[in-house]
Image (cartoon, rainbow, N blue to C red):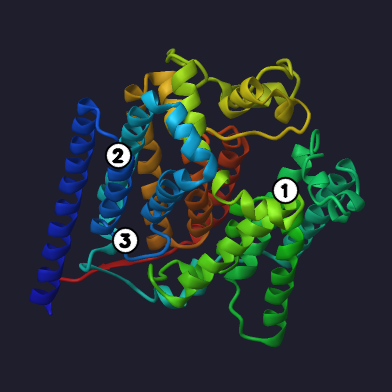
């Protein structure tokens, strides 16, 4: 038994080393091709896929899956959209450098995660009873507190709906009217969303061992489509599904029927979300690939701006001061808002909607790209640590990690520092202080 495990461990370490060396080699090859003037769009896609396959995670919730999904969909599949072909020609002189920066960031993140969390999938560690999580690894909330949270959810949702034009605005003939009338109601939206996230996670922690327990789970399931209308976010709806079934997904394999079901659900949510935003099926389906336009926006910035140290990096830190009136409301608290205001003024000024720029734009504008690399490494090192806490400690760490797992996409398509961490970090600290003591878990090392 020991020899077998030792052989598996050596094989796993050898595979990790080969994957890391090949990924770095791919980056060097692309850099040489850029220097020679070769079009690297197609080698970029091939290398992204191969790098992922040679460092292939075993578990569904491994953060490397989210990183690969983002880069493959946004920058490998996305450029096949009808609009992209035109933009790649229009910004031809910036395209190669853009793809090189994209692949460099991808490599750095994947290598950071691979080194940080490699041990979580090593055969020398056995996680006891992870498929049947004990009560000491589950969050339980007393009924009085749960009822207070449900009341808070209903009150905040009601105020949110009233301030956005009432139910007729959300369920009328123009489905996108409610979504684009949220100005001034952000606080109530945040309260009802994060209250709902926590409630749905707590319900998912309960074992279905009675008719009553099954009925409660069913109640939350049927609320998902209703909440989808008000949240109007594909990522947040997938977050709700992950939270409701969190314990069953913690140790789920990368390839399984559950993974296929999640994939089908994600595609369905994306299509329905496009319908809610645009208002008709024909335009929604036609907009499918053209939705992934982050590369186009990155190219625009490369053309129009030169890097300046901390040009926009300070913006998220102004959020609470803008919201409390200590700073003028005209100050931008997110560089995506600022760029939307520059390139598509009415979209922000009238609809309070934003376009999204990628993490590479943040790195380029503020640090000339290269000097932003340490911050990206730190960011995804923290994500890796949270994944390990989720796997080994369970409890509230599962909740925190699943939020951060989905928010990896927000960072990759939003920037290094996101303004909503002003309220997320205090929530995390409170949850850890209140519930982390219940996350008792023992890691057994096979000798």
- Label 2 vs 3, first from the N-terminus: 3
Residue 189 falls left or right of residue 311: right
Residue 315 falls left or right of residue 360: right
Residue furthest to the left in view is: 3
Q: Which residue is mark 2?
A: 108
Near mark 1 (Cα within 10 A), the count class, few <14, some 14-19 or many ≥20, is some
Tag count: 3
Return the residue nearer the eye: 275 or 386.
275
Q: Is residue 42 above or below residue 335?
A: below
Callout 1: SS: helix
Residue 31, quarter of the rendered image = top left
Q: Which residue is mark 3?
A: 57
Near mark 3 (Cα within 10 A), the count class, few <14, some 14-19 or many ≥20, is some
Q: Are marks 2 and 1 in contact (CB under 8 Å)?
A: no
Q: Position of residue 223 (x, y in %)?
A: 74, 66
Residue 130, quarter of the rendered image = bottom left
Q: Residue visible at 36% across and 49% down?
A: 384
Q: Residue visible at 49% across and 59% down?
A: 398
Q: Which residue is mark 1?
A: 277
């Amino acid at each position: 038994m020991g020899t077998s495990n030792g052989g598996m461990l050596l094989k796993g370490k050898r595979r990790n080393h080969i994957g890391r060396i090949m990924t770095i080699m791919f980056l060097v090859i692309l850099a040489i091709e850029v220097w020679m003037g070769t079009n690297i769009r197609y080698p970029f896609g091939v290398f992204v896929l191969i790098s992922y396959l040679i460092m292939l995670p075993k578990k569904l919730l491994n953060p490397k899956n989210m990183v690969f999904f983002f880069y493959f969909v946004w920058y490998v599949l996305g450029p096949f959209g009808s609009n992209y072909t035109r933009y790649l020609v229009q910004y031809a002189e910036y395209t190669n450098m853009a793809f090189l920066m994209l692949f460099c960031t991808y490599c750095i993140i994947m290598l950071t995660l691979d080194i940080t969390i490699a041990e979580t999938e090593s055969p020398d560690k056995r996680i006891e009873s992870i498929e049947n999580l004990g009560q000491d690894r589950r969050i339980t909330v007393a009924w009085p507190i749960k009822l207070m949270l449900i009341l808070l959810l209903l009150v905040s949702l009601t105020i949110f709906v009233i301030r956005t034009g009432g139910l007729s605005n959300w369920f009328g003939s123009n489905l996108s009217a409610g979504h684009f009338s949220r100005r001034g109601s952000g606080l109530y939206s945040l309260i009802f969303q994060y209250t709902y996230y926590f409630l749905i996670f707590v319900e998912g922690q309960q074992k279905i061992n009675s008719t009553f327990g099954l009925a409660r789970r069913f109640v939350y399931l049927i609320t998902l489509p209703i909440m989808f209308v008000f949240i109007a976010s594909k990522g947040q709806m997938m977050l709700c599904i992950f939270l409701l079934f969190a314990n069953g997904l913690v140790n789920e394999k990368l390839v399984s029927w559950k993974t296929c079901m999640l994939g089908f659900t994600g595609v369905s949510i994306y299509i329905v979300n496009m319908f809610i935003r645009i208002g008709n099926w024909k335009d929604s389906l036609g907009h499918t690939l053209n939705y992934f336009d982050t590369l186009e926006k990155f190219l625009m910035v490369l053309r129009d701006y030169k890097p300046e140290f901390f040009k926009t990096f300070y913006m998220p830190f102004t959020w609470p001061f803008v919201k409390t009136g200590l700073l003028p409301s005209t100050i931008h608290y997110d560089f995506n808002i600022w760029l939307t205001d520059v390139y598509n003024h009415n979209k922000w000024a009238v609809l309070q909607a934003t376009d999204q720029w990628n993490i590479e734009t943040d790195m380029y504008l503020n640090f000339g790209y290269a000097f932003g690399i340490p911050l990206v490494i730190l960011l995804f090192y923290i994500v890796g640590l949270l994944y390990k806490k989720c796997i080994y400690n369970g409890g509230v760490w599962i909740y925190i990690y699943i939020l951060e797992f989905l928010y990896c996409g927000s960072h990759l398509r939003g920037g290094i520092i996101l303004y909503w961490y002003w309220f997320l970090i205090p929530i995390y600290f409170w949850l850890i202080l209140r519930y982390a003591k219940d996350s008792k878990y023992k890691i057994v090392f096979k000798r």
